[in-house]
Amino acid sequence: MNVILTGMPGSGKSTAGVLLAKALGKSFVDTDLIIQQTAGMKLTDVIAAFGADGFRERENAALLSVNETDAVIATGGSAVFCESGMKHLKRSGIVVLLDVPLPELKKRLTEIKTRGVVMREGETLEQLAEERAPYYAGYADITIRESGDIESTVARIAESIAEYDARRK
């Protein structure tokens, strides 16, 4: 079973994902890295070259290209707008939403323009979070409200997955 991590940019999907993969003995896949490798450029350059729609096409293709069956998969923050890609991933595992309070996201995202985040001109982090929240919630099987250090977050994810798995049996 895969563990698919979703959440806002800066929520720790990649960082927690690597540690969670080690803790669970799974491989790790970062779909943002798939986009970069396929395009041969950084995420910010992909967005600049192809726009939001072109980026999302590439993001959806990256999600659809993931065929692992025992991995932790960190998705990009806008992956939840890629319906066929997210459905593909969800069929292979459990979706975990990393929910970070907005004040903490603001601290983490001091250079949001250099992170390869798809945002409209003049859009604020608050607006981005508000727009994405129902999509994140719609795909999530488990929501982890981050409130501590990364190790405790990873431990809570692992515990929640075990509990979820036990309920499904």
Image (cartoon, grey):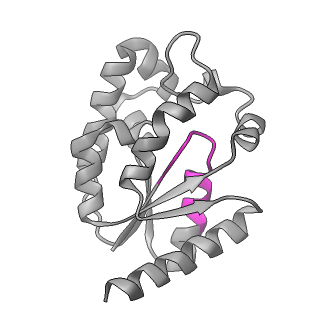
**Where residue 80 sits: x, y (%)?**
37, 42
Q: Residue at x 42, y 34 (%)?
A: 36
**The C terminus lies in which quarter of the figure?**
bottom left
- From where the camera sits, is residue 42 visible? no
Given residues 109 and 130, the one toward you in this image is 130
Q: Residue at x 26, y 45 (%)?
A: 85
Q: Give the range drawn in magenta.
A: 6-19
Q: Quadrant of the N terminus?
A: bottom left
Asked if the magenta segment contains residue 105, the reply would be no
Q: How many labels does the image show?
A: 0
In this picture, is 153 found above or below 130?
Answer: below
Q: Can residue 112 be seen in this view?
A: yes
Q: Residue 58's quadrant in the figure?
A: top left
| For residue 158, above or below residue 79 | below
Horizontal and vertical percent for residue 67?
24, 59
Q: Is residue 9 magenta?
A: yes
User: Which x, y percent locates residue 104?
Assistant: 75, 43
In the figure, is residue 82 to the left or right of 143? left
Q: Which residue is drawn at 70% across and 26% down?
A: 111
The residue at 45%/13% (across/down) is: 48
From the viewer's perspective, tell me whether residue 81 is left or right of residue 117.
left
Tell me: 15 left or right of 54.
right
Above or below residue 122? Residue 163 is: below
Q: In which quarter of the image is residue 32?
A: top left
Front one among 58 and 99? 99
Position of residue 127 measured from the top left corner of the image (x, y, whole percent): 57, 25
Vertical side of 44 occupied by 88: above or below: below
